[in-house]
Structure formats: C-alpha cells, structure tokens
Amino acid sequence: MSAVETLFIFVNMNIEEKINKLRAQLREHNYNYYVLDNPTISDYDFDVMLKELQALETAHPEYDDPNSPTHRVGGEVTKNFETVAHTFRMYSLDNSYSKEDLLDWEKRIKKMVDGEVKYTCELKYDGASMSLTYENGQLQRAVTRGDGFQGDDVTTNIKTIKSVPLQLKGDYPPKFEIRGEIVLPFEGFVKMNAERVANGEEPYRNPRNTASGSLKLQDSAEVAKRPLECLLYSLKAERLPVTTQFESLEKARSWGFKVPDIAKLASSIDEVLEFVTYWDVHRHELPYETDGVVIKVNNLQQQEELGYTAKAPRWAMAYKFKAEQVSTVLEKITYQVGRTGAITPVANLQPVALAGTIVKRASLHNADQIEKLDIREGDTVFVEKGGEIIPKIIGVDFTKRDPNSEPTTYISECPECQTALVRTEGEAQHYCPNTTGCPPQIIGRIQHFISRKAMDIEGLGGETVALLVENKLIYNYADLYELTVAQLLPLERMAQKSAENLVAGVAASKAIPFERVLFALGIRYVGETVAKKLAKHFKSIDALQAANFEQLIAVDEIGDRIAQSVIEFFSSEENIHTVNRLKDFGVQLQLSEAALANQTDVLAGNIFVVSGVFTKVSRTELKKLIEDNGGKVSSSISGKTNYVVAGDNMGPSKRTKAESLGISIISEDDFLAMI
Ligand code: AMP
Ligand code: ZN
C-alpha cells in the first residue's frame, strides 16, 4: 500500500468516526429535548452541529444512513404512499360510558381467565394511530392504521417527527412493532393557524384532522415543519421481553420512546374509575387532546387468553369522556338514496360550532328514529359529537317548539325517480325498489364496484363514474370493461393520458381476487367479511349461484337475511347476465389455484378453543390453520366445543371446564398431525 493510500484510509476513518460521533450526540440532544422536554444545549449549538453533520454527509455519501438525524428535516417527496399489510392487525376498541359498563366487562373477563386481574389505565390520545416497526434498534417502517388490516407506508414523513426515535438504546428486542398516536399539541396547532390566517389561508378546524392530514403530505419537509408528536402505548411481537402492559410501557420508555407517564395500575374497577374521574377534569390541562381513557388487562398472558372479537380486543376497553353538546335549529329534512336503494333522512342544521368543527348536517337514520325523537322541521335540537365523525341528534328542545308545527310525514316516493318506496317487515330502512332505473343507485353501485376495498380501479373516481353514466357510456359495472379511449376523449376534462389510464386501470382490475370481486358486486348485506366467507366456502360464483337457502345458511355466520339477499340477487336475469359478462371479460369469479392449495375441509364441522402458549406456530397462525382447514375457532369452552388445543400455561379453570364437559384436550403436535 502506498503512503498516499494509507493516509487516505486514515483520513476517511476519522471522517466516519466523526460522523458517527455527531450522530450520537445529536440523537441524545434530540431525545433530551423532544422526549424528556429537558434540553441541555441551546438551539443554536444544536443547529451548528446539525449543519456540520450535513456538510460531512454531503461530502461523503458513502457513509449515508437512512436513520441519520439529518433525515429529520425531510425533503423526500412521496407521490403515492404504498399500501402495506400489517403483521398484526390494528384493532379498534370497544367503548364504555358508565361504571355498569365496566363492571359488565369485568364480569365477562373473569369468566374467561383465571387469577387476579389488574388493569393498566392510560389516556386515549386523540390523533392518528400509527404502527412503527423496529429492527435491530432502527426504525424500519411506519404504517397508518388504514382499515386495520393494511395501511399506508408513511415512513419518510414519520422520520421528521422528532419524538420518534430513529435509533433505540438499551435492551430492545431484535424485531418488534410499537403502536402509538400521532398528535398535534394545541400550542403548535394555534401557532400554525395564526400563520395561515396571516397568509390569508383558511385556518384548520381541529388538531386531530390536521395531524392525520399531515401524515399524507407528499413533501416530507412540510411535515417536518409541523410540531407533531408521537405518543406510544403498546408493543407487539411474537415474543416480548415483558409480562405485563404496565412493564411494557416502562420498557418502551427506557428504549427512548415518548410514553406519557400518566398511566396507572389499578387493582379494581373502583380504582379505574378514580383515574377516569380525575382525568375527566384534568385533561384540559394537558398539552394535547384526549377523548377518554383506555383500560387494559395488565397481564399479557391473560390478554392472550381473552383474545379478540371481530373488531376489538376483549382485554381492552375505552371509556369515553362525555361528549360535547350544543343546540341548533333543524332547518330541513332531506332524503338521500344510497347504492342499494336505501333511503337515509338527513337533518340540515343551522351551522353550529361543535368540538372544533362546524356542523351543518346530521344523519337521522330512518323513519323510526324520526318518530322516536318526534323531530320536526323548525325544531331546536340537541346535537352531540363524541369521537365519531358524524354528529348525532339526540333530542328535541320541546320548550322551543312552535305550537303550530305538525309531526313529520316520511316520504312515500323516491326523491330521485318518484318510484313508490317499500319497507320490508322488520326492517328499519325504506328502499327504492327501482334498482335498474334510479340514477343514484346505478351510479352508487358502480362507485362501490370501483372503490378501494372492492376492485380498486386506478384512474377512475366517483365523479367520473357519474359523468360516464350521465353521458350514457355505461349503465352497469360490466360496461366498464368495454370502454375505449376514443369514447372517453370527448368527455369534459378527459385528456388522452387520463383516458388511457382509466382503460388500463379497468383492465388491471381483472387480477383482483374472487373474494373482492364478490364484495364489489354489491349484493345487499354481503360486506367484505361475508364476501370472504362465501368465497372461501363456495370457491366460485357458479357454486354460489347454484346454492339454495339451506346450503347458504349452513355456512358459518351466514344468516337468513344474507342468504335471502344472495338468492334474490341471482334471481334477477339482469344480474346473471352482468356476472356472465364479467366472466367473459376475464374478471376473477373463482378462487385462484394458490388460494385453493392451502385450504382443506379436514376440520369441517369442528369447533376449536385455543389456550396457552405454543412453540411451533404462533397463536394467530394456529387459528388461521384451523380456519383454512374448515374448522371454527371459538373463544370460550362450551358444550359445542370439539377440541381444546392446549399450549404451555393453559389456564387451570379452562382445563377443568374442558374435562368436566368431556372435551378432547390436544397438544400442538396432535393438532398439526390432524391437518
Ligand atoms: P377507536 O378508533 O375509537 O376504536 O379507538 C381505537 C384507537 O384508539 C386506537 O386505534 C388508537 O389509535 C387509539 N388510542 C389512543 N390512545 C390509546 C391507548 N392509550 N391505547 C390504545 N389505543 C389508543
Ligand atoms: Zn329511486
């Protein structure tokens, strides 16, 4: 090696060391400032160090690190956020509003688990939920909750939030996920709005929407300017180094995460209520918005035992603070027609400020609701808004009613096509039966077909669908597959490029799997989950079409109402014709080979309860295996249970119960042998 080469390596080593040292120092200062709220150097000194690091990194791109503190200033632009599947589903929470609700919940829990139950009480931060994945202490990925199964990858934007550590410290596990809420503290919100007003822009309505909107900004440098914070509250991994929720909060804090230390451990529902009562008042002193308390069973083993319902963990419960309420005048009741022909009455209100937004409309749900509330045009009504986005009318101020007012008479004809409405026995909703001639139904069905969770057709939006229908280019969703660029070009605001994209988007949708196509067809009551169940059971549209009522209700979780609706759908010549056309165009109307390959019926007719900890497969995998092979998973042991798959630490009360009912208790290996 020449002297020059040696010198070169020597100098470079110094530079690498220097870069690493600056990064470590900046990380520490960042942590002191944003997580601990306790800076130890001036902003000026911090900036000088950051600039020095930036200069070194620019001169030596070979030492680039995506998690360097310099990446916090943003600058990367994301055009389309990639959709990614969550490793662990992000559930919603069940809500409670009273002591009784909590006591009921405790009763349900105690039936399902053994031993003493303690609770971790945390505040429910009101922002946008986020899942962060760390590998070897480095932030790998940040994904929004989305629909709980999949969300948007917003990593570049999240990196700009200073309280999100890019590099962890301490004894963190090699790979895990951490969940939290992105919030915009009031102070920053007020400041941002002052700037907007000064610039002649419309102010933002509330911190929560501003926080979630920020995550989808394309320019991460813009996000970096917003004073967002990330408050963390739960760890997820196949194996965690902790046994309780409370410990996991402490651990996460020690790894460098911002975990509010408000959490409290409670040994009884009374102690939980003390926490709730205190924070219902004192939350107004916090720097960010909260809308309740989240109560979690503290012991993680007990959490596992309790598991999840279709929507939420059984081991957690949100307690909602009382919603804000205002009164305003109901000016007019109007009626909307949905894609299934369902009529929804809408209250048009005198605009009123409520919980940070201006409310102008509220749903009145159906005729019964109007009758129950005895609500009339001109009435002064009470409007409430809890966590949900759509405000609710909860009652009428009868002291202000005009004595000459008349009870509301519900419409009898469709406001769009004047067909007489029908209302089936036992149903709350009125329907317009003119499915093939009522414009909002025609448009709505196609809009549903192309929507994200259905055929997800790129290059085609809801407004374009309306335009296509109005111009008589399409009449139902099968017509989409015959559209040509030449037909589209004469339309308003349709350039060559967009026309080509639309046609290409439609063609690409032919690869969408059968279960989603089935959902897209828009059969009443066949939502996403039901479509999955039906697709899995019948495997093809032909088999589904051939099924009679008995065969349909024999499918797990398919009731009379859904079965009837499926039969009705296939009793229409027009629907059959449309489906056949889709088939001819090459749309997936049966399960793919790959989907079929992993499924069997060997467990059909058997109900399993899974309990304890497993070694070869995770609990989640085990449940999936049961379902993929035709079995059913239940959460509690009853006379209907066929097998209990027992792992380590199966609860003794479960064992006794299974034994007393004479149910076979099998091991993980026994189970795997069965399939
Ligand atoms: P909801 O969306 O009303 O069903 O409530 C569930 C959401 O509450 C979760 O997705 C989280 O985003 C949010 N959340 C806020 N604070 C917490 C907390 N401390 N623990 C769990 N979830 C929380
Ligand atoms: Zn109609």
Image (cartoon, rainbow, N blue to C red):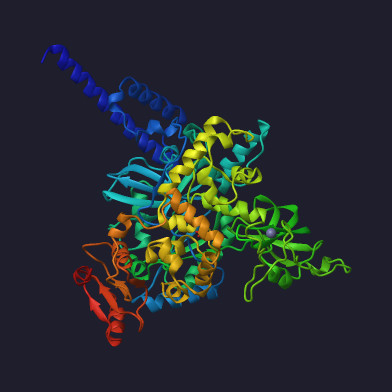
The residue lying toward the viewer, choosing from 55 and 37, is 55
**On the rendered structure, is 240 left or right of 82?**
left
Residue 503: x and y in percent read: 50, 39
Location of the C terminus (image quadrant): bottom left
Q: Is residue 311 visible?
A: no
- The residue at the point 22 percent across, 75 percent down is 666
Give the tally of numbered discs. Answer: 0
Residue 499 is situated, as x and y percent measured from the top left of the image, at 54, 35
Residue 373 x, y percent position in the rendering: 73, 70
Viewer can see residue 553: yes
For the residue pair 8 and 312, the one nearer the viewer reads as 312
257 left or right, relative to 599: right
Q: In which quarter of the image is residue 391?
A: bottom right
Q: As drawn, is 625 to the left or to the right of 84?
A: left
In the rendered image of this protein, does residue 451 appear above or below residue 626? Answer: above
Where 605 falls versus 484 (above or below)?
Answer: below
Q: Where is residue 77 in the image (x, y as percent from the top left)?
A: 46, 32
562 to the left or right of 21: right
**In what quadrant of the picture does the N terminus appear?**
top left
- Extreme residue in the left direction: 1
Residue 5 location, quadrant: top left
Q: Which of 94 and 457 is in front in this view?
A: 457
